[in-house]
């Protein structure tokens, strides 16, 4: 939800900046960012429902693990599947951070507060997604044979890249503080 709010804020900033823009090229880029932000917002809202479904699948696999026909492999697959949803959320929020950085150079000083707040919300979405994914991944032992290592590495890369973007945005926002 933090990411969806960030996307809404960035889209709103783009609309305001389009009205103030004096360059057709800047307007085109702002429209592109606006459309991408709204697309990410739709994706993030859909991921809320997918996350609930994935959590239910994990809970069901944990209950079924002790029942006849329930297997450890099914439980591990459910955990891996469930980790994918928050990772997609983190990736979408990472994309929002990229958009926030682009908007900073186009929107002007009067949008700094909204861009900074949107970036903070997007980073919160990254952190929430990574922590949730790692919680699911922690239930899968290394060497289980279901491909968890690439997912763990992906989560680390997303977090590291998002943190670097957040730092760039914060530094740029600070330049405009009185």
Image (cartoon, rainbow, N blue to C red):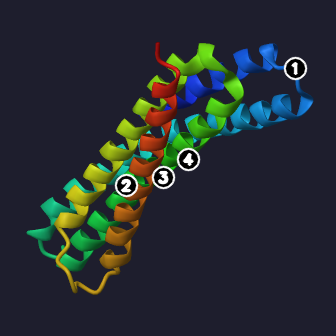
**Residue at coordinates 34% horizontally, 63% vertically from top-left?**
156
| Element on which disc 4 rests | helix
Name the residue located 76 percent from the left edge and 31 percent from the top edge.
30
* Horizontal side of residue 47 vs 128, given as left or right: right
**What residue is rendered at 20% in x and 81% in y?**
142
Give the spatial CA distance, label 3 vs label 4: 6 Å
Residue nearest the viewer, comparing 78 with 131: 131
Mark 3 vs mark 1: in front: 1
Q: How many marks?
A: 4
Q: Position of residue 146 (x, y in %)?
A: 32, 81
Q: How far is mark 3 from mark 2, CA to CA?
A: 9 Å
Using a 10 Å C-alpha cutoff, classify the residue at mark 2 as few (fewer than 14 neighbours), some (14 to 19) or many (20 or more). Answer: many
The residue that mark 1 highlights is 22
**Residue 5 visible from this viewpoint:** no
- Mark linked to residue 95: 4
**Residue under circle 3?**
91
| Left or right, 40 with reference to 155 | right
Considering the numbered disc 3 on the image, is that residue within a helix, a strand or a loop? helix
* Residue at mark 4 to residue at mark 1: CA–CA distance: 26 Å
The answer to whether the residues at label 4 and label 1 have Cβ atoms under 8 Å apart is: no
Rounded to the nearest whole Å, what is the CA distance between mark 1 and mark 2?
36 Å
The mark that comes first in sequence, 3 or 2, is 3
Disc 3 + disc 4, Cβ < 8 Å: yes
Contact, mark 3 vs mark 1 (Cβ under 8 Å): no
Q: Kindly report the distance in space between the C-alpha atoms of the residues bearing marks 4 and 2.
A: 12 Å
Residue indicated by mark 2: 159
Task: Find the distance from the CA under tag 3 to the CA under tag 1.
Answer: 33 Å
Locate residue 178 relative to residue 24 in the image: left or right. Answer: left
């Amino acid at each position: 939800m933090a990411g969806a709010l960030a996307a809404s804020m960035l889209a709103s900033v783009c609309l305001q900046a389009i009205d103030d823009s004096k360059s057709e090229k800047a307007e085109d880029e702002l429209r592109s960012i606006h459309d991408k932000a709204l697309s990410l917002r739709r994706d993030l809202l859909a991921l809320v429902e997918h996350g609930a479904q994935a959590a239910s699948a994990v809970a069901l696999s944990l209950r079924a693990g002790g029942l006849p026909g329930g297997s450890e492999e099914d439980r591990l697959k459910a955990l891996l599947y469930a980790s994918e949803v928050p990772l997609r959320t983190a990736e979408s929020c990472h994309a929002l951070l990229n958009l926030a950085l682009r908007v900073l150079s186009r929107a002007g000083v009067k949008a700094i507060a909204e861009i900074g707040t949107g970036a903070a919300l997007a980073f919160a979405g990254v952190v929430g997604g990574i922590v949730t994914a790692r919680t699911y991944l922690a239930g899968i032992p290394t060497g289980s044979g279901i491909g968890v290592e690439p997912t763990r590495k992906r989560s680390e890369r997303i977090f590291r890249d998002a943190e670097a973007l957040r730092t760039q945005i914060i530094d740029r926002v600070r330049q405009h503080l009185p």
